[in-house]
Image: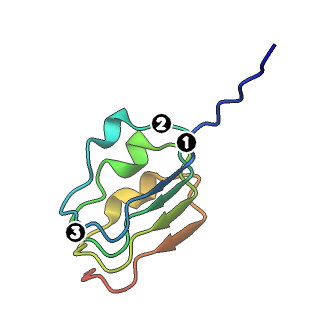
Amino acid sequence: YTILTIKLIIKAELNNNNLQQLPSIKTWSQQIVMLDISFNQCTSLDEVCAALPNLTVLKASNNEFHVVDSLNMCSKLKYVDLSHNNII
């Protein structure tokens, strides 16, 4: 017998991709705990917390965010990097 271990995707690294918005986040694994979307051109984080309930680390520096109110719904979030954005 061969035992195959399947690891769940728990880290999504989408940094440095010139993204203006995240790809359809609703279809991602809800087990993701780390999301790196740094150095893109994203403007909204609205779907992140609802789609990724286990998110503990969010790296989102160097984007085009102005408002990040939706992060209040991320109850497990422990580390957030939103530096170099235009948050008001």
Q: Is residue 61 left or right of residue 55?
A: left
Q: Amino acid at mark 3?
A: Asn
Residue 4, relative to residue 23: is it above or below? Answer: above
Image x and y of residue 77, in percent: 56, 59
For image coordinates 22% across by 75% down, the residue present is 64
Task: Judge the density around disc 1: few (<14), some (14-19), many (≥20) Cα neighbours within 10 Å.
Answer: few
Toward the bottom, the furthest residue is 84
Location of mark 1 (residue): 9
Mark 1 lies on a secondary structure that is loop
The residue at which mark 2 appears reads as 29
Q: Residue at x 23, y 66 (%)?
A: 42
The answer to whether 20 appears left or right of 81 in the picture is left
Residue density around tag 3, few if under 14, some if 14–19, many if 20 or more, within 10 Å:
some
Query: Residue 48 placed where, x, y %?
Result: 37, 50
Q: Distance of mark 3 from mark 2, alpha carbons? A: 22 Å
Figure check: 62 above or below 38: below
SS category of the residue bearing label 3: loop
Instruction: Say whether disc 1 or disc 2 marks the residue closer to the N-terminus.
Output: 1
Q: Amino acid type of disc 1?
A: Ile
Tell me the residue at 40%/77% (across/down). 82
Taking depth in this image into account, of 56 and 39 the one nearest to the observer is 39
Label 3: which residue? Answer: 18
Query: Would you say the residues marked 1 and 2 are in contact, meaning their CB atoms lie under 8 Å apart?
Result: yes
- Residue 34, image quadrant: bottom right
Q: Is residue 4 above or below residue 34?
A: above
Q: Residues within 10 Å of mark 2 (few under 14, many from 20)?
A: some
Decide which of 2, 21 is in the foreground and name it.
2
Q: Position of residue 18 (x, y in %)?
A: 22, 69
Q: Secondary structure at mark 2?
A: loop
